[in-house]
Image (tube, rainbow, N blue to C red):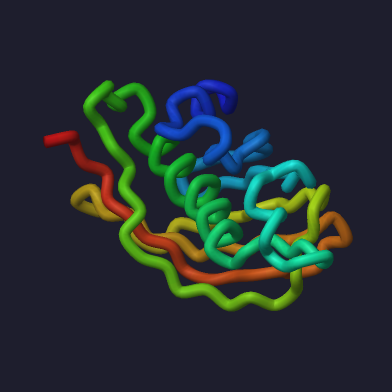
Amino acid sequence: MDFKDIIAKLPYSEPFLFVDEILQADENGITGTYTFREDLDFYKGHFKNNPVTPGVILTETMAQIGMVCLGIYLVGNDLQKETVVAFTSADMQFLKPVYPNEKVTVTSQKTFFRFGKLKCDVVMKNEAGQEVCKGIVAGMITTKL
């Protein structure tokens, strides 16, 4: 599967798409990037005069790249229009702030994929290669009801 096809199959669009490119994917994991543009709405109020990317947005970025994109890759050609990769849980540690215009790289390693359930260890690094957050994301691959 072409990496651009993975992004095209994501169920998100601007302003809630947090994947710019996929760099690597295989049956064990995936790596992708996203740049947090300074014009994103959430920076207007988080925090006044010192914008920082909210942890919930960092978590969403790691889930989109590290779990949803990987799930799409794993399902591959079996992905149907009615298939959904649903985010179900996260356990995160936030280590450093991410500021406007920073590019981050998310690397995910599959720890569990069975019966439509996917669980991954994810790490986000800044352009200097420093870990900014890490944790576990999980979800389900299912069909719409």
Q: Is residue 24 left or right of residue 49?
A: left
Residue drawn at (72%, 67%), measured in percent from left and top?
Answer: 47
* Residue at x 18%, y 34% (from the top left corner): 144
Residue 24 appears left or right of 110 = right
Residue 50 percent across, percent down from the top left: 82, 67
Task: Name the outermost residue toward the left.
Answer: 145
54 in relation to 116, above or below: below
Q: Position of residue 77 (x, y in %)?
A: 35, 22
- Looking at the rendered image, the quarter that the C terminus falls into is top left
Nearest the eye: 55 or 90: 55
The residue at the point 33 percent across, 42 percent down is 85
Residue 141 image position (x, y, % from top left): 27, 44
Q: Where 90 sits versus 6, above or below?
A: below
Residue 52 location, quadrant: bottom right
Label tally:
0
Give left or right: position of 119 versus 8.
left
Q: Nearer the viewer, residue 104 or 116?
A: 104
Residue placed most toward the observer, 89 or 6: 89
Pinpoint residue 24: horizontal percent, then vertical percent.
63, 39
Q: Residue furthest right?
A: 128
